[in-house]
Image (cartoon, coloured by chain):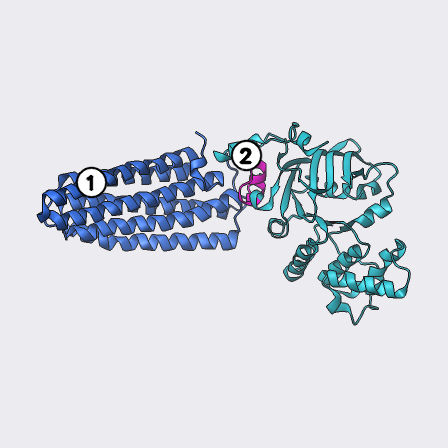
């Protein structure tokens, strides 16, 4: 489906902006997506995505593009489906037996849910960083080297050394660990462990990085370092981040998508969403008037 | 209909901010009305009282600024709440200027020799009345967050501009016909200029209120 077709379907409401000129927000009962779910140059395109956990319909017909080299923040109250949606993007939901996904998620024009798609290389292309840092019980070096080795990206020790150094540099961790690469990754601080996990993700050369509340277990200083890193990584990667922190979403992202009870309610530039949202539910949520 | 904020204290602060702005606006309107009263009665005592009272408006301005800064730093408001606090900050500055102009009118009352220039004085009275209506309308628009009302207030400035042009015409005519009234004519022209500037500051207030409601700074873009 082209982006033109998409904007003409029921799921978007371009009239909302005209209402916005009078300051009237779209009514809370309107569940159509408003704003700009499509972009000119998408890295990943999701079309009519539905997710079910057995009989529970968790995500309702969500269509959303993720643009090249952008950071998109997925926000919404607990249980709104933002993490479920994120996990669809590299088929992490496949690990849940009762989970069923319908619709299309296109990466380079190919539906990642096609039967012939191998999830192992897919997850190398679409990497993930989780809420709690989860380094392997191995050395710092081996944590980063593990992925390239199993994906066959390196043949020699020199190649491995280079990829480990490059990944740790990109993750902003090299200077802190270069003299103790043989020490366990679990011995690092929380913020360092999370950056090690980011280095591990980067090491296999992903195009997209998914982050599921990557700073929720970190202190403000470690959080600031990760946010700074996200901004630097944007030059080379596309990032989708789920966060509960409105401040974090507004600091790190260029686009923001607001989810509510499984519906994608509003998508727009982060500036527009946080200054002048068009939907009453978005306004309620980001102003702290969600009752 | 707006839901209550999850922190009741924030709603309370918004209410305090709104009340402070309304009180300051009332005070400015009162100062303006009194300055015109002082002009029509050439009451120098009343003029002195108005000049002295401008200090209260300046204090109100500082209080509002401090409250808005504290709300931004502590509450980190977003969307319409952020727009309201930012607009409140701006509106207080505009009102402070309105107060200054009302005091400026009063400062020049003692310079008037006599009041036999009815036409120009009538123009000033009309301009001040319109400005007073604009202040009241703006405060209604702010309390109700009403974009259409803000636009009505914004448009009313045309009346002030019209009367200012009329005043200038009459003053020029008077200067030609009665050169002996030159000093008074100049003073009245200055007072008219004060009223014209007051109108401009109230249009800025109306634009701020429109921004609170719509998130747009383009009040001309309104669709009625």
Check residue A222 in the rendering and tell me which mark sits there, or answer none.
none
Residue at screen point 24% across, 51% down: B103
Q: Quadrant of the C terminus of chain B?
A: top left
Give the letter of the blue chain.
B
Chain to which the residue tagged by mark 2 belongs: A
SS assignment at label 1: helix
User: Label 1: few (<14), some or many (≥20) within 10 Å?
Assistant: few
Left or right for A56, reference B5: right
Residue B11 vs residue A130, the one in the foreground = A130
Residue underneath mark 1:
B169
Left or right for B30, reference A224: left
| Residue A284 is inside the magenta segment | yes
Occupied quadrant, residue A88: top right
Q: Nearer the viewer, mark 1 or mark 2?
A: 1
Occupied quadrant, residue B210: top left
Question: Magenta segment, which residues?
Answer: A274-289
Give the letter of the cyan chain.
A
Residue underneath mark 2:
A17
Could you tell me what secondary structure mostly forms the magenta stretch?
Answer: helix
Residue A48 location in percent, x, y? Answer: 73, 32
Residue A208 against residue A115 in the figure, above or below? below
Furthest-right residue in this view:
A155
User: Label 2: few (<14), some or many (≥20) within 10 Å?
Assistant: some
Residue A199 vs residue B191, the one in the foreground = B191
Furthest-front residue in this view:
B176
């Amino acid at each position: 489906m082209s982006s033109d077709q998409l904007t003409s379907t029921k799921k978007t409401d371009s009239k909302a902006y005209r209402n916005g000129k009078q300051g009237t927000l779209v009514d809370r009962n309107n569940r159509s997506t408003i704003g700009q779910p499509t972009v000119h140059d998408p890295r990943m395109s999701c079309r009519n995505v539905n997710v079910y956990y057995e009989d529970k319909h968790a995500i309702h017909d969500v269509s959303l593009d993720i643009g090249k080299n952008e950071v998109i923040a997925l926000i919404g109250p607990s249980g709104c489906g933002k993490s479920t949606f994120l996990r669809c993007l590299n088929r992490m939901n496949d690990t849940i037996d009762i989970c069923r996904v319908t619709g299309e998620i296109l990466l380079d024009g190919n539906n990642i849910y096609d039967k012939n798609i191998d999830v192992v290389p897919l997850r190398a292309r679409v990497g993930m960083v989780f809420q709690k840092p989860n380094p392997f019980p191995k050395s710092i070096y081996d944590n980063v080297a593990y992925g390239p080795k199993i994906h066959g990206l390196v043949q020699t020790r020199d190649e491995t050394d280079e990829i480990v150094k490059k990944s740790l540099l990109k993750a902003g961790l090299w200077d802190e660990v270069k003299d103790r690469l043989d020490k366990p990754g679990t011995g690092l601080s929380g913020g360092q462990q999370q950056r090690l996990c980011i280095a591990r993700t980067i090491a296999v050369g992903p195009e997209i990085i998914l982050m599921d509340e990557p700073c929720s277990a970190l202190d403000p200083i470690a959080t600031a370092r990760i946010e700074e890193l996200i901004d630097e990584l944007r030059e080379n990667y596309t990032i989708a981040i789920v966060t509960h922190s409105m401040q974090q979403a507004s600091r790190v992202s260029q686009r923001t998508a607001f989810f509510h009870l499984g519906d994608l309610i509003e998508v727009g530039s982060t500036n527009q969403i946080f200054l002048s949202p068009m939907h009453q539910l978005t306004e309620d949520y980001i102003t702290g008037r969600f009752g | 209909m707006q839901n209550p904020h999850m922190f009741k204290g924030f709603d309370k602060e918004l209410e305090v901010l709104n009340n402070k702005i309304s009180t300051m606006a009332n005070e400015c309107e009162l100062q303006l009305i009194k300055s015109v009263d002082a002009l029509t009665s050439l009451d120098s005592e009343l003029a002195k009282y108005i000049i002295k009272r401008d200090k209260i408006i300046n204090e109100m301005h500082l209080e509002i600024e401090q409250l808005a800064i504290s709300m931004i730093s502590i509450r980190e408001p977003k969307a319409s709440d952020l727009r309201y606090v930012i607009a409140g900050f701006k509106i207080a500055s505009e009102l402070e200027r309105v107060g200054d102009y009302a005091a400026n009118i009063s400062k020049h009352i003692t310079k008037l020799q006599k009041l036999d220039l009815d036409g120009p004085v009538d123009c000033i009275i009309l301009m001040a009345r319109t400005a007073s209506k604009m202040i009241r309308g703006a405060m209604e628009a702010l309390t109700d967050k009403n974009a259409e009302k803000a636009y009505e207030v914004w448009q009313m400035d045309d009346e002030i501009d019209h009367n200012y042009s009329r005043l200038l015409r009459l003053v020029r005519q008077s200067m030609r016909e009665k050169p002996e009234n030159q000093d008074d004519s100049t003073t009245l022209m200055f007072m008219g200029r004060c009223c014209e500037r007051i109108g401009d500051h109230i249009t800025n207030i109306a634009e701020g209120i429109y921004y609170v409601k719509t998130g747009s700074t383009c009040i001309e873009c309104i669709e009625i």
